[in-house]
Amino acid sequence: MNRTATCRTAGGVLIAGMIVAAASLHGHATDGPPVPVETAARTAGDEPAARGDETFRVAVARFSHETCTFCPGGDVEVEDWYRHAEPRTGDDVLRLSSYVRGFSKKAGEYNDMELIGLTSPVGVWGGTSRSWNKEEVFDYFVGNMIDELREQMPVDGVFLSVHGAMAVRNIDRPEAEMARRFREVVGEDVPIVATFDFHGNEDEAFLEWADGTFVTKRFPHYDAYRQGERAARYLRNMMRGEYTPAIAVRRPPILTATVLQWTGQSPLMDIYERARRWEDREPGAYVNVFLGFPWSDVPTIGTTVQVMTDGDQELADHIAEDMAWFIWDVREGWAHGEFPQPDEAVRLTREAIDAGETPVVLADYWDRPGDATWTLRELIDQNVPRVLYGALTAEPALDAIWEEDLQPGDAFDRPVGGYTGPQAGEPVRIKGTLIWRGEQWGYDRVAAIEFGDSSVIFLVPAYQQLRTPESLRVGPVEPDEFDVFVLKTRVHFRRGFDETGYAPTIHIVDAPGDWFGTVRLDALDYENADIDAYYPFGDPDPDPATW
């Protein structure tokens, strides 16, 4: 990847060329005493301003989607973004997500930042199991934001909460396009910053129009709130003229499935610790690492490093090069994964039950639509008791429950799951009793069916990723009474089931086929990305001059 020496300077941003002599930088860090990251992120003037001092007006907007372009179901329409909830307006925008809440809280502590919420969508029906957004969806929501922004001008800064893996028909880099449209309105001198999920498919394009990015460093994303706080501090320092970003970007050619991106184990733990060390050692340095989202068929899939420093381009290049080389050096440790098939996973589950090593978590990591039945069928066939299945996408079954007005205590007997084609498996007949129905997890219709030997299955209208035992404490269901949990999740479940010590036995369950969602990305028909250009699916050039 080759960049011009400077992309934009009127707004105070310096982006250096992407090709530098880097061999001497490989693996080295700058000497000197460590600087705490909170201190490193500050310049003079980080203290709260007194009332009556200059007030900075900051526009705030959120438009976030992790798009699975390989998922079935058709392209996303505008109305799909209204099905969960109406877009938020005004001050309600400032509470939309952990990123935004962190930004708003920190901005409020300074007493000199007035936040202006631009109308922002809450979320799309089906979440990360939904496919391409139509171009008119992007134009509609961003267009409304831009119209409101024009009415609010002038502003002194812009904060955007985005994901990084949104996919839009005819727009290769939607987050960068969003920043470009905001830049057209606010002009060159108004700083724009954004928070991102580290599954973003980003390169340098966003930073050609914006001034800073703040990316989560943990998966599960415990630090989303913190990244919002850091973005507020950074933006304020820029608005006060106390920070002039110099930016460097590198893209080591590595592509991985998200199930392999858990930061609770090495070497990914080491990669993000290295980024934090750089931030601690170098005042004003910010180090971001995107690992990418491979089920979004866009040109920018894969791994990206973005670095901002306070006016020191040499240091920015040095850190970015060091990080890229380190990631490349440890690639074998986090780019591969083999997991048991459903039959073996259930057999291992029975062994764990016999040994008293319960509860057991079975994570159907690959099932993005949430309707696959392979693990469910094996549990029934192998007569495993006390299973809590949370949750199976089964909108037709929910339609029947509500149309027939079934109530708790009524019999339930019908096939569920297996709706989205061969990868989902065949529908499984569940014969049991409806024990609960109602609103849950943002849906207006969820049902719990008791079946088999003291087992319960939750039916939901669209994909639902559950992260904690507490989230399954619904109606009469007490999660502590079950020996086995089946979850449609890759890593987020570790928040409540693994890293708390709740579940002593965990099995990541693979699919009996090379379908979307699995680690076998080379089986997918990418149209907008060359998968052979990425490790471990091809033989990419390890020369940083090509990154």
Image (cartoon, rainbow, N blue to C red):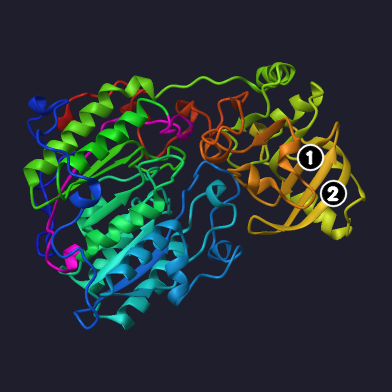
**Label 1: how many residues lie within 10 Å, few (<14), some (14-19) or many (20+)?**
many
Which residues fall within the magenta stretch?
237-264
Q: CA distance from mark 1 to mark 2?
A: 9 Å
Q: Mark 1 or 2 closer to N-term?
A: 2
Q: In the rendered view of the protein, which quadrant contains the N terminus?
A: top left
Magenta includes 114?
no
Circles 1 and 2 in contact, beta carbons < 8 Å? yes
Magenta includes 250?
yes
Question: Which residue: 29% across, 58% down?
Answer: 231
The label number, if any, that marks residue 305 in the structure image: none
Of residues 142 and 343, the one drawn nearer to the viewer in this rendering: 343
Q: Is residue 396 left or right of residue 295?
A: right
In the rendered image, the vertical position of residue 481 relative to residue 69, given as above or below: above
In the rendered image, the vertical position of residue 105 relative to residue 422, given as above or below: below
Q: Is residue 419 left or right of residue 289?
A: right
Label 1: which secondary element: strand
Image x and y of residue 375, in percent: 70, 28
Residue type at the position of mark 1: Val
Question: Which residue: 73% across, 30% down?
Answer: 483
Question: Which residue: 13% across, 64% down?
Answer: 11
